[in-house]
Image (tube, helix red, strand yellow):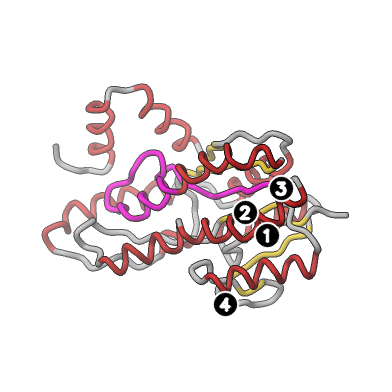
Amino acid sequence: MDNVALVTGASSGIGQAIARRLAADGLRVFGTARAAKGDLLSLDVTRDESVAGCVADVLARAGRIDVLVNNAGYLLAGGVEEATLAEARAQLETNFFGVVRMIQAVLPHMRERGAGKIVTISSLAGLVPVPFWAYYNASKFAVEGLCETLRHEVKPFGIRVAMVEPGAIKTPLYATPHARELPEYAKWREAGLAAMAEFERKAPGPEVVAACVSKVVRAAKPKLRNRVTREATMFSFLRWLLPAGAFEAGVRRGFKLPD
């Protein structure tokens, strides 16, 4: 029997590439999107009933879920002060609590079977914060803590937990509208976001993330953290290596921010 994978946020970008790669690897893949179309299942990770219904649907069709790939998410760009509290909550509701909902929904089945893999798409932004991405950074930092803890808790049940941490990738994520824009931040916000746009311009496509997910899924004992792109490896290493002040100064220079 083919292994079964459930991939959230599979309508485009990284999620679509992951679903296609896992299908090419021989898995039976169920991709999801908020608005179901074609072979995609309907799933809104911010709604309890939608998550429960989607997982139940996959189990009814396939009888099992061997792999959960948490990919659904979006970017709210802008300064901390520029976002409304409702916008900040919405960012965490999708990027963090959406992951929590999916994990809680599949764990009873995986525990009963004594096997399973939970792979979550985190980000370099969950290790090295990007200026003017505060709430996205916060959501990914929260995911990092969640998954590292979960890895300890479910290992006795034969369930493996891993994260994939991409740097800049060419993906529709970057097209998400910004929060409100206050003129006081305009000069520095524009400089910071322009620096990220330049990273994106030079970035590889989502297939590199899909290849990493494929490797994690096929591994008997996957690593907790699996970095994708040169920047993800380099910047996380430099944060560990350099004194805090030196690293912070380097980030500010990189994003054209004043000392």
Residue 18 disc label: none
Q: Nearer the viewer, mark 3 or mark 4?
A: 3
Asked if disc 2 and disc 1 are in contact, CB closer than 8 Å, the reply is yes
Under mark 1, the amino acid is: Leu
Q: Residue 55 appears at what percent x and percent y?
A: 67, 66
- Residue corresponding to mark 1: 6
Closer to the N terminus: mark 1 or mark 3? 1
Task: Answer above or below: position of 189 versus 117.
Answer: below
Under mark 2, the amino acid is: Val
SS for callout 1: strand
Task: Answer above or below: position of 37 versus 80.
Answer: below
Count neighbours of disc 2 (C-alpha within 10 A) and say few if under 14, some if 14 to 19, many if 20 or more: many
Under mark 3, the amino acid is: Gly
In this image, 178 relative to 59: left or right? left
Q: Nearer the viewer, mark 1 or mark 4?
A: 1
Closer to the N terminus: mark 2 or mark 1? 1
Closer to the N terminus: mark 3 or mark 4? 4
- Magenta span: 117-142
SS for callout 2: strand
Instruction: Quote the CA–CA distance across marks 2 and 1.
Output: 6 Å
Q: Nearer the viewer, mark 3 or mark 2?
A: 3
